[in-house]
Amino acid sequence: MCIGTETDLAKNRTFHITTFGCQMNEHDSEIMAGMLAEKGYEPVNTRDEADIVIFNTCSIRENADKRFFGTLGQLKHRKLEEREAFTVCVCGCMMQQQHIIDTLKSKYPWVDIVFGTHNLHQLPILLDNLYNENKKQIEVWQDGGEIVEGLPAKRLFKHKSFVNIMYGCNNFCSYCIVPYTRGRERSRRPEDIVTEVRKLASDGVKEITLLGQNVNSYRGCGEKCETDFTDLIYMLSEIDGIERIRFMTSHPKDLSDKLIDAFRNCDKLCKYIHLPVQAGSNDVLKAMNRKYTRESYLKLVKKIRTAVPSIAISTDIIVGFPGETEKDFEDTLDLAREVGYDSAFTFLYSIRQGTPAAKRTDQIPEEIKHQRFNRLVEVINSISAEKNREYRGTTQMVLADGVSRSKEGTYEGRTDSFKLVNFVGEPGLEGKIIPVKITDSNTFSLTGERE
Ligand code: SAH
Ligand code: SF4
Ligand code: F3S
């Protein structure tokens, strides 16, 4: 069989990536797009236009799984009609589970390429194999192995970027699938991260968001294993051109005083923290294996607010964890009121096959879960609206991300505290950090005028 060169194979082939899930997945998709563009494949805006369709999946809740299978099913007709001219690839967290692979094999045998979270760097090779040898492949690694450095990424924004500092998770919260789909915790070497951020800065990036499932347990091994997360922040803050540093996500069980000090001492570290609490009842927190108590969490919030009174705090909350009583739930409502979150992501507990909580026999009926969910959202939204109201009349430095898709003629940007701001501005503001006077607010955003 004739083996074509890379450019031959990629020639005129277009691709589209659909991403489900969190920032990790978004960033993985940017890396896949970078690798494909480097090989000569061309990105297009819609699945219909693309010769290669890639789904980067998420498995965090059942509806994420369902949405993926629903969307994938829509491609069957086209695949059977166009055959070799149309390539379907699936990857991401769902693929790290055997029952998903089994479903794909039995119900979606027309899918061309399946790979997992640990070997996404293989995508170009898997495509080469398909086009050279007409070989359909399922290639999923069970473990992370060595971290692959130096992969290109095609960023969504010119002025801001995600930066992975670690992979995987060792926490095994009893409801969560991530430790099974992303493997054990592995930190990148600090010098590799610094090199990447320097390169980003020279390419015009002003804001970086450091990504990890629990950034507080970052342990960077250069010559010695002595760089912790806060050290890394200070190292990155020395890089000229980088003006804002954010991070996701911080586990409350091991957030250090050193990090809290960094919020005060490091101007570039944005005054915003996402601190998932998950529940306000000690019984539920224990059953979730979160390793902190309601009291220690509240103490931590107090410490952070004492150090930086203006800091914005957001959280994740799960409603309807197995065994959750009305009293447990009310403890969560109370905690949400006491903390006064700027915003919160609220989730209905979803059974994830293979996790300890899935085996529990005291699952909460859907109807009760939904009722509690609605009550929680009401509390959260009224606090968010109140918090946003406090911004009225202030002037905020806003990084302009681009023109708003929802409101014609307006820009969207973020304050240092991660509040979304809509404002009218002339073309060319994208990527600039500018003062905006806040004139109005609602539950989810602020409105302002350029100063
Ligand atoms: N590593 C991060 C969270 C990653 S997953 C952390 O520990 O904070 C994002 C959020 O999804 C979690 O914080 C949790 O609130 C939610 N989540 C995870 N598993 C879930 C499940 N089985 N059902 C409902 N929500 C879940
Ligand atoms: Fe999941 Fe817990 Fe790890 Fe977060 S810390 S990814 S919730 S296991
Ligand atoms: Fe993220 Fe979903 Fe995987 S939340 S880590 S893409 S399971």
Image: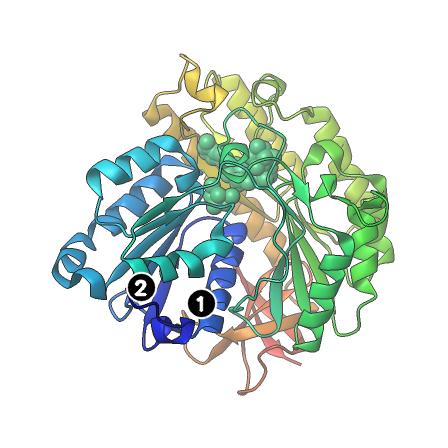
Quadrant where the image shows the C terminus: bottom right
In the picture of the structure, the residue carrying the numbered disc 1 is 36
Q: Amino acid at mark 1?
A: Leu
Give the label on residue 125, or none.
none
In the picture of the structure, the residue carrying the numbered disc 2 is 52
Q: Amino acid at mark 2?
A: Ile
x%, y% of residue 172? 58, 27
Answer yes or no: disc 2 within 8 Å of ligand 3. Answer: no
Determine which quarter of the picture holds residue 341: top right
Mark 1: few, some, or many residues within 10 Å (few <14, many ≥20)? many
Residue at 69 percent of width and 71 percent of height = 199
**Dots 1, 2 in contact, CB < 8 A:** yes
x%, y% of residue 100? 33, 36
Determine which quarter of the picture holds residue 214: top right
Q: Is residue 34 visible?
A: yes
Quadrant where the image shows the N terminus: bottom left
Comparing 424 with 223, the one in front is 223
Determine which quarter of the picture holds residue 125: bottom left
